[in-house]
Image (tube, rainbow, N blue to C red):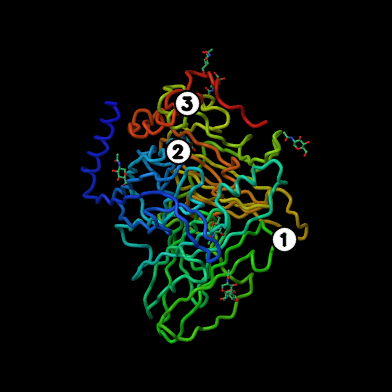
Amino acid sequence: MFRALLGIYIVAAAYLLLCQAARVVHDWDIGYLNINRDGYTTRRAIGVNGQLPIPPIYVTKGDTLIINVHNSLDVPTSIHAHGLFEKGTSFMDGAGLVTQCGIPPGDNFTYAINADQAGTFWIHGHYNHQNVDGLRTPLVIYDTEPPVLDYDEDKLVFLEEWYVNEFAVRMAEVLNPLVPFPPPPSFPYGLINGINGNDTTPITFAPGRKYRLRVINMSSTEWYKFSLPGHQLQIIEADGIDAVPYTVDGLDLGPGQRYSVVVTAHDTDAYNYQYNATLYANFVPFIPGMNPRYYTGLIEYKKGAPIKTIAPTADGQYVWSDDILLKAWDHQPLLSANKTFEWTISSHKYSNNITLAILDEMPFQPPLVPPLFSAFSMGDLALNETIYGPQTRAHVLRLGEVIEIVVHNPTILDHAMHLHGHAFQVTEYGPSGKPVDPDAPPILVRQFTDWPMRRDTFVVPAFHYAKVHFCADNPGVWMFHCHMDVHFAMGLAITFVEAPDVLQKQQVVPQALLDMCHKQGIVTEGNGAGNAGFNLTGLPPVPS
Ligand SMILES: *[C@@H]1O[C@H](CO)[C@@H](O)[C@H](O)[C@H]1NC(C)=O
Ligand SMILES: *[C@@H]1O[C@H](CO)[C@@H](O)[C@H](O)[C@H]1NC(C)=O
Ligand SMILES: *[C@@H]1O[C@H](CO)[C@@H](O)[C@H](O)[C@H]1NC(C)=O
Ligand SMILES: *[C@@H]1O[C@H](CO)[C@@H](O)[C@H](O)[C@H]1NC(C)=O
Ligand SMILES: *[C@@H]1O[C@H](CO)[C@@H](O)[C@H](O)[C@H]1NC(C)=O
Ligand SMILES: *[C@@H]1O[C@H](CO)[C@@H](O)[C@H](O)[C@H]1NC(C)=O
Ligand SMILES: *[C@@H]1O[C@H](CO)[C@@H](O)[C@H](O)[C@H]1NC(C)=O
Ligand SMILES: *[C@@H]1O[C@H](CO)[C@@H](O)[C@H](O)[C@H]1NC(C)=O
Ligand SMILES: [Cu+2]
């Protein structure tokens, strides 16, 4: 207790010394509401203070974002600041049952999140996939440095998908041994800035001005293409990392990904334009009126001005965003790898007839003790990954090691892989497995040039592999998981236990985090089973 309190005081003192930084405080009462978001169905959803969409959060680099959460749900909840490194505060990462136990129903917890980075992020539920049911909102961190390109005004465009059913209902179908796998796709509707796609409010432009549009894909399963026909987009940021300006016609965003683009408005307001947002899943068959779903909205220069028609560009000539072609603005060179993990995405039907997804040998399932607490409490043994339990898929990293991850995806589905606590260099894409269509053009190996772009979420397209590098400079326990929530819930995840020896010396878990576990009967000491040493007695069996 004393150690915990001392930790809090040291952290608080550091804030005072480091910065005149503001403390930006939000009170979030997370609860259920009934709402019709897609124009078709009223259903139960999860919002904040009785609202959906949740108002975006804006802070400035150096600020501390305080979110006082009260949990009005009937299950635990937690929130995760997607893309923030949480350096020195790994226990604020919010990954349910990995770095915290979840706030019990009726309880409160205060997240103190250091906004040490600048860019476009989002905050979302990280317990039971509550994000899919609405618990998500943009987080914009304004920079204190000049931007890569000047602009006059900042605007948010956040894209979401919205399902007719709650996530738990869809997931129960996926995991039902009596329903043939995969069940028929339930295709969602698109929301733009929180409102049913075609009904959303116009994006207003004034002649001659330059806009920074921050486009965020907060959906959980589908992809989005976003374009402003008649305008060019200059990418200056991806996932909170500044990029050397790169001009495209449109953005192709996987779940969790963000881009900032600078758009120069035309110098007359004679015409309005239409933007296009297409929600699609290339792994679901083409179904007219359903996949893809097309949305258009107005770029309004002047109320009532005629809409300029722009002839569609032939598919192959359109320049879409492509992270392998982007360059990091800070010119960070390739980090040469000390260690490589090579994993292949697959799925397997287990003896109970339930199909689960695998990144590394077996599906991820949380152990009895959240691995962050094992890392804190197991002394030297925390360096031995056996103690976390096999289903944790724990991989221990040493401080300062450069890690290369190669993810092979010989499946028909794209996957969007997200790493907590880091942004990785995206270094290579290439072929993996045999595409179904023998006449499809061959998939080429493509590598970064000069300064690999860094981001926190990368898409491994179907029948591709992707390679990324990152430096293990952030002690903590960080999940690496597919950001498509159905796949994540099926086990497509692993954990990195990063420098637990250093973690034990530098960080102290706040007592309130331990208390919320104890209230739920979750042990916060010992190995993955809550025992000493290598005794994993009591852990549920791994799927067989
Ligand atoms: C918990 O949060 C609620 C709502 O913000 C507040 O009314 C209540 O006083 C808080 N309770 C405690 C014990 O801090
Ligand atoms: C957003 O991500 C989802 C998957 O999570 C994806 O299906 C959708 O296409 C993406 N949308 C955009 C605009 O990138
Ligand atoms: C949105 O409007 C466009 C026409 O502007 C139409 O083609 C499209 O089908 C509409 N989308 C949905 C999902 O209704
Ligand atoms: C925008 O999307 C609509 C479909 O909603 C399509 O008819 C139109 O060709 C697209 N415009 C461009 C320039 O791609
Ligand atoms: C799994 O499915 C097979 C074939 O449908 C059936 O014979 C078997 O009993 C099922 N096993 C379980 C554990 O449900
Ligand atoms: C971890 O502990 C197991 C069991 O004692 C042992 O077999 C293994 O070699 C250890 N691994 C490392 C990396 O020390
Ligand atoms: C990683 O490899 C570099 C050489 O490529 C070496 O200098 C460095 O010591 C290694 N770091 C660790 C932590 O193994
Ligand atoms: C292993 O842990 C269990 C409790 O989970 C305990 O009952 C058992 O005695 C322990 N075994 C050894 C060899 O310590
Ligand atoms: Cu996936």
Q: Earlier in the sequence, mark 1 or mark 3?
A: 3
Q: What residue would you read off at disc 3?
A: 383
Residue type at tag 1: Pro
Which residue occupies the foreground of this view, 7 or 429? 7
Total numbered labels? 3
**Drawn side of residue 348 relative to residue 478, left or right:** right
Work out which quarter of the rendered image holds the C terminus and state it: top right
- What residue lies at 41% left-to-right and 22% top-to-bottom? 379
In the displayed structure, 345 sits above or below 199; it is above
Residue at image position (50%, 63%) is: 191
- The residue labelled by disc 1 is 441
Task: Say what amino acid the circle numbered 3 marks.
Answer: Leu
Secondary structure beneath dot 2 equals loop
Which of 105/162 is in front?
105
Q: Is mark 1 within 8 Å of ligand 2?
A: no
Question: Could you tell me residue 92's position as x and y percent?
Answer: 38, 40
From the image, tell me which residue sits under label 2: 472
Residue name at image x 61 percent, y 72 percent = 317
Location of residue 434 with respect to 156 vertically, above or below: above
The residue lying at 43 percent from left, 73 percent from top is: 203
Label 3 CB-ligand 6 distance < 8 A:
yes
Q: Earlier in the sequence, mark 3 or mark 2?
A: 3
